[in-house]
Image: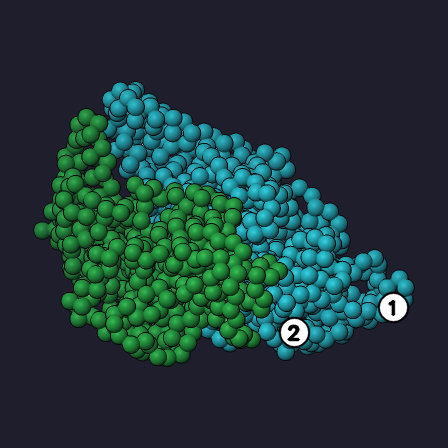
Amino acid sequence: MATTGKVTGIVSNLVTVQVDGPVAENELCQVYWGDTPLLAEVIKVNGDKASVQVFESTRGVQGGDKVEFLGRMLEVTLGPGLLSGIYDGLENNLATMESVFLKRGEYTAALDNTKKWAFKPLAAPGDKVSAASWLGEVQEGWLPHKIMVPFSFQGEYTVQSVAPEGEYTIDDTMAVLRNEEGEEIPVTMTQKWPVKIAVKAYREKPRPQKIMETGVRVIDSFNPIAEGGTGFIPGPFGCGKTVLQHAIAKQGEADVIVMAACGERANEVVEIFTEFPELVDPHTGRKLMERTTIICNTSNMPVAAREASVYTAMTICEYYRAMGLRCLLLADSTSRWAQALREMSNRLEELPGSDAFPVDLSATISNFYARAGMVILNNGERGAVTFIGTVSPAGGNLKEPVTESTKKAARCFYALEQNRADQKRYPAVNPIDSYSKYLEYPEICEWLNSRIEEGWVDNVLKAKNYVRRGREMADQINILGDDGVPVSYHEAYWKSELIDYAFLQQDAFDSVDALCPMERQKFMLDLLLDICGRDFQFDDFEKCRAFFKDLINDLRQMNYSEWGSEDFRAYQETISKKLAENGK
Amino acid sequence: MANKAYQRTYTQLSAITKATISLGASHVTNEELAVVDGKLAQVVKTRGNDVTLQVFSGTEGIPTNAEVSFLGTPPTLKVSEQLAGRFFNAYGHPIDGGPEVEGEERETGGPSVNPYKRRQPSELIPTGIAGIDLNNTLVTGQKIPFFADPDQPYNRVMADVALRADVDKIILGGMGLSNDDYLYFRQQFEAAGALDRIVCFINTTENPPVERLLVPDMALTAAEYFAVDKNEKVLVLLTDMTLYADALCIVSNRMDQIPSKDSMPGSLYSDLAKIYEKAVQLPTGGSITIIAVTTLNDGDITHAIPDNTGYITEGQLFLRADSDSGCTIVDPFRSLSRLKQLVQGKKTREDHSQVMNAGVRLYADAKNAKSKLENGFDLSDYDLRCIDYAKEYATRLLSIEVNIRIEEMLDIAWELFAKYFTPAETGIKQALMDKYGKWQ
């Protein structure tokens, strides 16, 4: 007999329910607004009073209204067909909803149950299997989508039968398993999993061992993110967070991209599903949309579903990771999620932490970031979830709880800077303050040195140091004036500008410059270090400035030219000539 | 409504604050309206039989034995073509002496548009102001505020923009508008002969502050009627959103909510987003564009209100008094229209974005030259040319007094480039310079 209850209190989307039986923390329930059930989640229980957050507007709900508890937590349906989908935070398919306006209480199925998928068995009768074992595969776009033993199955099973090769819908029985008690259990192409619980059906989660290329120089070379790593991008509004994130989504070296638009502008989501079907994935030549899933809870959609949206997105990534695929999760922005937590905590009248955020904010964020990672599956294959979140710090001030909590959890930090954005130096990632902890991992350094070139990591650190020195010199020049410092100060400053203009800055809207492969990054960095290593001995600072400005222009033109093209080589020659004339 | 209640009347209040009252009542639905001692109120909290209502016009003079009758519905607005040309108060009642509007009764503050049903905005809204059209082009379906100090003529600029924009309806939501400004808008609309395409919902400083909370929802419900039902291009003007946020702050404070940054309610972001995200481009051709005003305190954009707004809106427009030209200009550095690249060079001339970038970059060089001058360093010939250019650029293009077509703006920019700079100094693509450049 399911537990039921009656509404006794309402403040915005927090509803208090008097219950007549047992309820679980995070259990789902339906609050009836007339005949329409509104989905809600238990967030606190006190005696026979449960506080539930409703995922929809509670307008019109009244004291005494009926509530039915569902005996399960918030789950998502996992199966073939998730890619190229656009869902809300609760995994309702937005594309199949009919009306222009989102209707309260309208829930749509995540997957199409009429579509036929070509199935190929991978397991045979008699095989011993457990949760996440591969039973067969279907082709989803260009990805082999594994049909697995549901993650929720505990213990060992024996395969009784597997469907033969053929076309099936997601609800057909693909295999029958027998458990240790001898019961027979049918398995379809889909399974359900509670979003707030991490999928742990893998053998181990080792430290990451390689980097994930994004084609963005300031990330790949200066602050690389590991495959299965975590990173975050804080920045005030108007600094290019969205452009940078979209660049990573378009170019990231991953099989599956999940974008969680969490409390952000609806027009940005529109941009993704308008442009991605046209854009081509540089790694496979297929349409970008084929490997992309969008989870969107835009800023005007119900606040409580915002929290669910990031968990839903993460669960989908974990699902594809279990197939041995590399997934990239981008969440924009985790601050809005934190604000949703704050609104709820506030209505629950909990004692607030700093800036009125709940005191467990930091723990919640760390737990979430910890779900990313590279894993070795039970069958020895590897899969990864790389996670990059953005943070929107209030007033652009990085000393606020969400940024500080995230800094403790994420391994890469890409600080967007107002000052750089004002000067149109995009991407506005501050080269000094930003960091990647992965450059301290011996296994990653070794991988970079063997993959790119011997001594690569040292070169990167050297380049960083030129930039740092240049900044110090710029301060001196600003205080003492152009004439008040030795010419060598100007030389050091312009060397840093050279690295800034020709390497750190990158035009995300230029068809060539937007994507810079590792080989090209290596070439450019070597060239720049060669220039910076020279001692020029200019007669005065005007000559120094003119020389470097000229050189910067040539290098930028080079960035805009096709790799290895005639133009490219022509600029390269011009540069060598100019260096030969001036360098010593 | 799911279950419409009888009109129930109570006469025993248990608590009164400056903005809210509480009483024991049953069968009260969340967010429904009630009349308290003749004043309109809305349910904001239910706890057992204890119901708290926010009283829009303030609780002054309400006695503990006041009559409270519940109306059974949330705030609604009657929508039809009759809305056009009318002036209403925050409750949607006429203040122009005309009859009540007849039409379908719609709940205000309703659900949002399914993101999947939106289209990418792609239609330009010309305003004649070069600081906007040239540098920060507006697009239908966009939401953008003016960030302005109280002494700047933002209401004037907004009225100009509205009247010059090629739209079917202009809906003004005035919150805490001074009576003088209200009359100014009214007179401007009348003088332009535009009354038939105007709808106004006005809360002036003479009205109680909490009433303002109703205004954006009223204005946007009317906007949705014209955009969704009638496929019209609607421009919504909201002034001043800072005063709206202040009213939110008052109510949350009276409800003993824990304040977050700058004593604003923790839900400020969601509250503002609910309004701004109503801006939409629909596939049927209808659209809602929102231009708002957020007044700043001495240019401080880190305050919670402008800060949250900036994260929601698609850019912002800054007004600034410019000493060079002696006029108010649209600041090219701090202003931004995030959607401009959707129309620049696509719906406008091909040289648009290059000319815009060159113009602003040279203006930035002039700023550097000026600070050199202030610090007592010598100026080069280039610096001096930049300073002269900046003055003419501000007067002929950035000033809000300018009212010309976009092609003219581009031509003036080319003219200035030729007058003060060499082709190489502008850094524009050679092909465009050959085609449009005005060098001899």
Q: Is residue B387 left or right of residue A547?
A: left
Image coordinates for residue B171, horizontal then vertical, percent: 30, 67
Pick the residue in front: A153 or A216: A153
Q: Position of residue B440 (x, y in %)?
A: 9, 51
Numbered label attached to residue A183? 1
Colour assigned to chain B in the rendering is green
Residue type marked 2:
Trp
Question: Is A232 above or below relative to B60?
Answer: above
- Is A199 on the left or on the right of A286, as rendered? right
Q: Nearer the viewer, residue B238 or A141?
A: B238
> Can you identify the residue that label 2 sits on?
A117
Compared across the picture, whether B82 is left or right of B104 comes to left
Residue B322: name its quadrant: top left
The type of residue carrying mark 1 is Glu
Q: Secondary structure at mark 2?
A: strand
Q: Left or right: where does residue A54 sit relative to residue A152?
A: left
